[in-house]
Amino acid sequence: MKTRFNLILALLSGALLYAQDLELDVYVLPTSVLGDPILFNVTVKNKGDKPVPGVEVLVTLKSGLKFSGVSPKKSDFDVKTGIWKLGEVVPNKAKTLGIIANYAKRDDAIVIAEISASGAIDPDSTPGNGVDTNGNGMIINDKGDEDDGDAAQNGPFN
Ligand SMILES: [Ca+2]
Ligand SMILES: [Ca+2]
Ligand SMILES: [Ca+2]
């Protein structure tokens, strides 16, 4: 009985040691001119103390934007699926993907991003469960949502 208890303890502490806290934010450098390119930066941070392998992010552009490209160009981003494969994210070293898109429509010029896969357990967020995790209809800088998803909007400008 005691052996089993120790085994469970060892398993639990192993899981806790491997728990890492990933955080994602989307920022926009806005433009008010329709047709102009806009840069959205998707940034992933590891606030834990060990590297996290196998990290992937799902990026979605709403109808007010027309995708143009990514920065840096060599980033592992699949335009068809919207999946950015970052690989390993180490502590204190953020990884950023620039999404360049044209400002096509006044409304809905929004980029949404969330961590869709991770090789470590995160105590305060779950990969791939949507950005609006508190169900209040807000996704842009909503501190009430999980920290592994976010959105940013260009405009709307009058
Ligand atoms: Ca997290
Ligand atoms: Ca999540
Ligand atoms: Ca929300």
Image: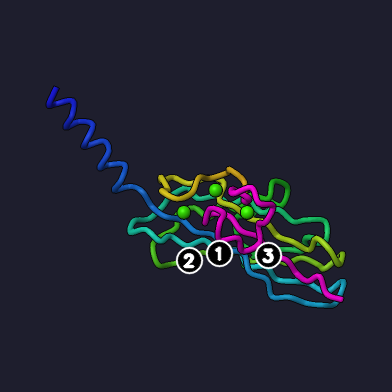
Report the residue that reaches farthest toward the left. Answer: 2
Query: In the rendered image of this protein, does residue 33 appear above or below residue 128?
Result: below
Residue at numbered disc 1: 43
Q: Is residue 85 magenta?
A: no
Mark 2 element type: loop
Please name which of the two marks, 1 or 3, marks the residue nearer to the observer.
Answer: 3
Split into quadrants, the picture shows ligand 3 in the one at bottom right
Percent x, y of residue 101: 76, 65
Q: Quadrant of residue 24?
A: bottom right
Please name which of the two marks, 3 or 2, marks the residue nearer to the observer.
Answer: 3
- Residue type (three-letter) at the residue carrying disc 2: Ala
Report the residue that reaches farthest toward the front. Answer: 136
Percent x, y of residue 130: 62, 46
Residue at numbered disc 3: 152
Residue at numbered disc 2: 94
What residue is drawn where x is 69% and y is 75%?
29
How many angstroms separate mark 3 from mark 2 (CA)? 18 Å
Report the residue that reaches farthest toward the top. Answer: 1
Percent x, y of residue 158: 87, 76
Q: What stretch is highlighted in magenta?
A: 131-158
